[in-house]
Amino acid sequence: MSGCWMLVLHSHLPFVKHPEFDYFLEEHWLYEAISETYLPLLMNMKKLEEEGVPFRITVSVTPPLADMLSDTMLMQRFEKYLDRLIELANKEKERTAHDRTQNRVAWMYLERFERLKEFYTGFLGRSVLNGYRYFMNKGSLEIITCGFTHGFLPLMNGDNAVRAQIELAVKSHEKKFGTPPKGIWLPECAYYAGLEKILSDYGIRYFFVDTHGVLYSKPRPRYGVYAPVYTSNGVAAFGRDYYSSKQVWSSKEGYPGDTCYRDFYRDIGYDLDAEYIAPYISPDGTRVFTGMKYHKITGSSEHKEIYEPEAAKSKTAEHAAHFVAEREKQIKELNGVMDRKPLVVSPYDAELFGHWWFEGPDFLANVFREIDKNPEITAVTPMEYLAEFPTNQMVEVNPSSWGDKGYYDVWLNNGNEWIYRHLHFMADAMVSLARKHSSTKEDFINRALNQMTRELFLAQSSDWAFLMTTETATEYSTRRTKEHIHNFLRLRELVDNRDFDYDFLTKLETKNSIFPEIDFRVYA
């Protein structure tokens, strides 16, 4: 008896759009993710297709990310970003001409950036989502949704707020991909008892939880995390496999820490002369990552040797072979105690592959090449596994998340607890206003209430609470949260006083433009 492996990639970024500035640092989160993760992954999928190597990947594309990838202004800025990378790589090709080792790396970047642009403007038709749709229609990708703005569902006040997050997520997904989602990546893998009832109401068939979410279920799951379990209403929960996650995630034992791989932190945006690098960093002179890095990890000391692309590429094949061999060992051990095909579920943040771990997309492509040669392992998607094994144990899934310590304290602690009284007040106010004005035909009232709904959703994003806890972009995340709260309260004041300030409203509609089809009656 063989077994199954399931790769799940969670693709998410918070909605960041600042048309009021020509350059905004946090917008580069998106541009880096596209050029370093989404495009390389899609390019490797195309290579696998051309080689005749089958693959199956489950990918969440969150509504904020999908909206940014569909935003004309942001995508125009992304092309300019890509053009600057090509310009910089051309300059680097000349600057490093005297150093053969570095020059090889500069040429690698130039060729890479040019291929990215060709793939983006050619095969993808200037739309990353076109790539996801292409492989979805081929049956290689199973695309799932997430909370509408990645709101942390267990900390919302009541079913109305949670239902709104799920309802608009489903509508957004259907608009972007032409079909309603069958699965969901719960924001931060955060589950609470009873959530499955809401998921079921919107046609969601399955979700994912961290290992302890399944292992601590009641009754104890017969197969551990190596088969899905059903909640009381038949919605399936898939649990994360600890071992395959550790091999990739662990900073000490994981593959990305290999000394051959590219060092993330040594970037020419910080290393080179300020005057030379000025056109490619922040206009105010703030040093930022350019994406061009010449060094490999080498070791734990400050000394870093020059990166060798071919050696790193070979290492991805070696690591992929090891990864698949380890899954085969797991499956053979599980075959001895299970009466069905074991399932190993490996979920990761998509941005690990390419952004944090430069060689990650090549590693994944090599994993599928290895699986294609291995008769013991089949790559599957959730719906494929549920179709083959429709009968599963019913349990009460344990409340949990995949954050530090496994529960909710990353998103509720002394550093960020202040946000929730505002979020709860705004959600309650939105319910009252939606019911009061549900039949309105007044243009300003309708648009203002729709924008209030956007401001609430954007304030609910779990990213802001997370960044406050990790003290990463703390100032920006705090400012964003306060900005959305202020916008909501100002719009409410305008609605209550019938003060039709169209200039203020239009400004917000242009900037915080997530899901233009939004309807405030989702809260009614």
Image (spheres, rainbow, N blue to C red):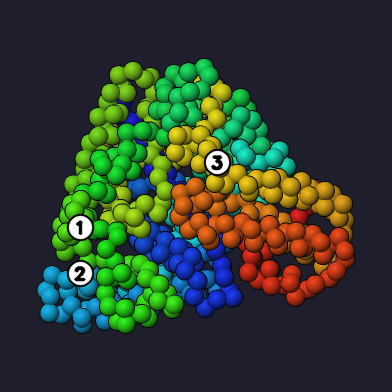
Tag nearer the camera, 1 or 2: 1
Residue 160: image location, x then y, percent: 73, 42
Cβ–Cβ below 8 Å for labels 3 and 2? no
Decide if residue 273 is on the left or right side of residue 191. left
Residue 518: image location, x then y, percent: 70, 58
* Circle 2: residue type: Val
Q: Specify the label residue 302 is tagged with.
A: 1
* Circle 3: residue type: Asn
Q: Is residue 376 above or below residue 472?
A: above
The earlier-in-sequence mark between 1 and 2 is: 2
Image quadrant assignment for residue 516: bottom right
Q: Secondary structure at mark 1?
A: loop
Residue shown at 31%/41% (left/top)?
250
Cβ–Cβ below 8 Å for labels 1 and 3? no
Q: Disc 2 designates what residue?
A: 105
Q: Disc 3 designates what residue?
A: 413
Q: Does residue 251 appear in the picture of this structure?
A: yes
